Image: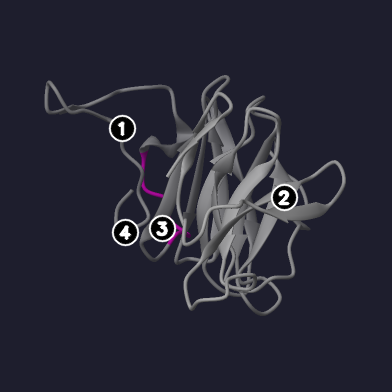
Amino acid sequence: GSSEGAVSLWDWRAETELKRPWTAHRPVPEASGAMQAMAFSPVGWTLATAGGDRTLRLWGAGRQPAFSNHTEAVSCAAFSPDGSTVAFSAEYAGPTEVYTMPAGGGVPHRCTYDGNARVIGWTKGGKILYSTTRYSTLPNPQLLLFDPATSTSSVVPLAQASDGSYAGDTLFF
């Protein structure tokens, strides 16, 4: 992403821009502000971008982007393992929280009420990995898992782990 709100795909080996049938390939006139996050869907050709223009955009081959406007910045996008849902962090109704939205577009759903919540990714079982300072005994972020099926969060029992990634069932931090 660029500070002008444009999205380009590059082949870093050839140092050339890729030409794909993406609507996202060209600058978006209504976009402004720098891109804060980008995430590719694990299935199909869908790209989520989040940025300082207070918008989460879902791009796909040959279609106009679906988007959700917020009152403040949107950041930290990640697709679910099946590609059906995108999780993101936004200051939609006050502090930064975790939200989800169908990958085809739609109304965002607030998942957390923790404050300062930052989406990290998903587990293969469909839980959202995120960080927040709410449950930490130190002034450091703590990793949590949010289960969309039960709308519950649980602390990942790793002291001072604030970032990570799942590979199968293993959490790397």
Mark 3 or 4, closer to the camera = 3
User: How many angstroms separate mark 2 from mark 3 (CA)?
Assistant: 22 Å
Q: Disc 3 marks which amino acid? A: Gln
Residue 138: x %, y % from top left: 50, 76
To which residue does mark 1 refer?
Answer: 9
To which residue does mark 3 refer?
Answer: 36
To which residue does mark 2 refer?
Answer: 146
Residue 39 included in the magenta stretch of the image: no
Judged from the image, the secondary structure of the residue bearing numbered disc 4 is loop
Mark 1 or 4, closer to the camera = 1
Mark 1 or 2, closer to the camera = 2
Residue 18: x %, y % from top left: 27, 24
To which residue does mark 4 refer?
Answer: 4
User: How many angstroms separate mark 1 from mark 2 (CA)?
Assistant: 31 Å
Identity of the residue drawn at 36% across and 41% down? 26
Instruction: Give the crowd class for mark 1: few <14, some 14-19, many >=20 residues within 10 Å.
Output: some
